Amino acid sequence: MSTSKVTPFPAPPSAEDSSDGRRLRSERSRSQIIDALFGLIREGDMNPSAARVAERAAVGQRTVFRHFEDMDSLFGEMAEQIQSEVMPIVLAPYAASDWRERLSELVKRRSDVFERIFPVRVSANLRRFQSRFLMDEYRRGLMFERQTLKAILPPEILGDAVLLDALDVATGFHSWRRMRQDQNLSQQEATRVMMLMVERLIKE
């Protein structure tokens, strides 16, 4: 007489397995939300609402706010990703030793960096008047631009406050945005204009 084999019931998932599953779903939703915000901004919606982000990400608004306390947090998360992409470009050692040649390198670097951050920077600038966080980020960005410029300039330029301010404006994001958005210049054209402004300002 054969004895039938009893198949045990599968063990219930452990608390650790359930926790891992929730974590993976949470990370997936977070990534979808960031991608949705990027996509909306790149398509021209410079001030997307949480509702639009949720719709694009195919998640509920409650999911959006569960990951991010508010839209400021969403922009902050996105800014961190962008910074991790562009900071190696910004902080790379200069090939030239002469400050004039380094200034030319800086213009070319900023052309690349400003293009990468353009839609997000414009969108954040639009929202900064309703957000202390974004206003603080805006001011930090201006300060960082000025500090990286000053780091390559000689004492005679640093000692000329008016010339320093002029170079700061000429090589800053606001000038780039005006050329690319308001004047409808191509990236190559805007780079040439920025280079010309710098060359004229430092011409002996």
Image: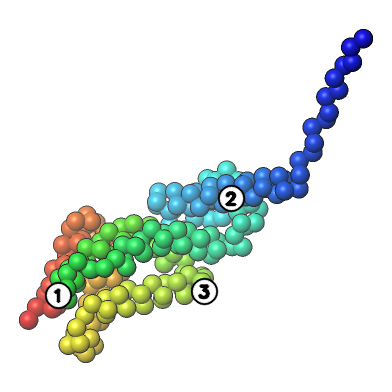
Circles 2 and 3: CB atoms closer than 8 Å: no
Disc number placed over residue 84 in the picture, else none:
none
Residue placed most toward the observer, 175 or 154? 154
Q: Quadrant of residue 187?
A: bottom left
The amino acid type of the residue labelled 3 equals Arg
Read off the residue under disc 1: 98
Hey, what amino acid is under mark 2? Answer: Glu
> Which residue corresponds to the image point at 61% horizontal and 56% vertical from the top-left?
67
Determine the residue located farthest toward the bottom in the rendered image.
Answer: 159
Q: Earlier in the sequence, mark 2 or mark 3?
A: 2
3D distance between C-alphas at marks 2 and 3:
27 Å
Of badges 2 and 1, nearer the viewer stands 1
- Which residue does the numbered mark 3 point to in the structure image? 132
- Which of these two is toward me, 95 or 78? 95
Marks 2 and 1 close (CB-CB < 8 Å): no
Q: Is residue 145 above or below residue 70?
A: below
Q: Which mark is residue 27?
A: 2
Looking at this view, name the residue that lies furthest to the right: 1
Measure the C-alpha gap from mark 3 to mark 1.
40 Å
Q: Residues within 10 Å of mark 2 (few under 14, many from 20)?
A: few
The N terminus - image quarter: top right
Q: Position of residue 120 (x, y in %)?
A: 41, 59
Between label 2 and label 3, give the one nearer the viewer.
Answer: 2
